[in-house]
Amino acid sequence: MILLPKKEGLIKESEEFIFSAIASKDMVIDYGKGCYLWDVKGNQYLDLDAGLYCSILGHSNEEFNKAIIEQTRKVVHLGSNFLSLSVLEAVRQIATITPDELKKVILLCTGNEAAECALKIAKVSTGKYEIVGMERGYYGITQDAQSASGFGAYYGMSTPRAPGSHKILAPYCFRCPVRETYPQCDFLCLEVSKKLLDSNTTGNVAAFIFEPILGSGGIIVPPEGYFKRLKELADEYNALLIDDEVTTGIGRTGEWFGIQHYGIVPDILFCLQNIGCGFSSSRRRHHTRD
């Protein structure tokens, strides 16, 4: 058994070596099993955080660990210069669960990289530069992703927004931003948002980015019919739809992806390392346009 210093000592030591973007919990984790975690003092916790949405099979899943061990005996990392059988099998399997024609797959290294690349693909493919996010949406902390997000100083994101970044009102029926009631409102939040976009954009909207269920914004479930109307709005601007499946992807809502409940197909879809159960920091994005 390895004797560890007391929890307070470990946390104090971490402050000397770790540059933290966010504050860590007041505990040091030793190991996990299933949906539980144990700290270095032997205290047991129910992990409702699920490794920032990633540990969809629970901690220390035996079948998953076996697959990791088998792969490490072959090769761990190749970069993007080579194709391997494991990569080919992975993208083939991903393509069997994505909605309809979303069959092209890009494997990337970080979550923010996936969001940024999705936004860049939208800009390049449309020849336009403006991005529309939701005012309670969260898509990442790098430049374009942060700029599309609805959180600023709340997450310490006080850097300037990217040019061409706009917001629409979130479909937050519980605390309606326009003080109406669904379904009598007939999606007045989108009507008001369109008026704001018409007066603030230059007509160069490349994409609307959204979450099927807003995660960091308060676990907000949009009402029935909302995303069909959002697609109609995007079509008016001849803009793409980018689906952020970080909190809703890989079976969390009863479908493989959250957007499958709403009867529309986005142009670009990306998800977090939940697709790898948190083993790497990769997100996978699926897009329809070459």
Image (spheres, rainbow, N blue to C red):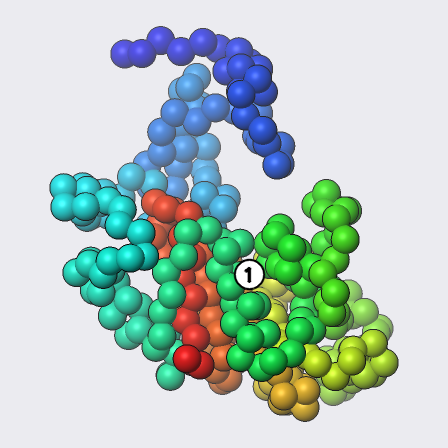
Per the image, the residue denoted by label 1 is 116
Mark 1 residue crowding within 10 angstroms, few (<14) / some (14–19) / many (20+): many
Q: Is residue 152 above or below residue 144?
A: above
Q: Looking at the picture, how far across and down is residue 182, in whole percent?
A: 73, 80
- Horizontal side of 193 relative to 33 (left or right) equals right
Q: Across the whole image, how many numbered discs are drawn on residues?
A: 1
Q: Is residue 38 above or below residue 288?
A: above
Give the residue at x 58% y 82%. Answer: 126
Q: Tell me the amino acid under the disc marked 1.
A: Glu
| Closer-to-camera residue (128/136) | 128
Is residue 33 at least partly visible in the picture? yes
Give the residue at x 39% y 25%. Answer: 30
Q: Looking at the picture, how far across and down is residue 163, in whole percent?
A: 74, 65
Q: Looking at the picture, how far across and down is residue 283, in whole percent?
A: 42, 57
- Quarter location, residue 150: bottom right
Mark 1 lies on a secondary structure that is helix
| Closer-to-camera residue (176/98) | 98
Q: Is residue 235 above or below residue 42?
A: below
Give the residue at x 48% y 82%. Answer: 265
Is residue 149 at least partly visible in the picture? no
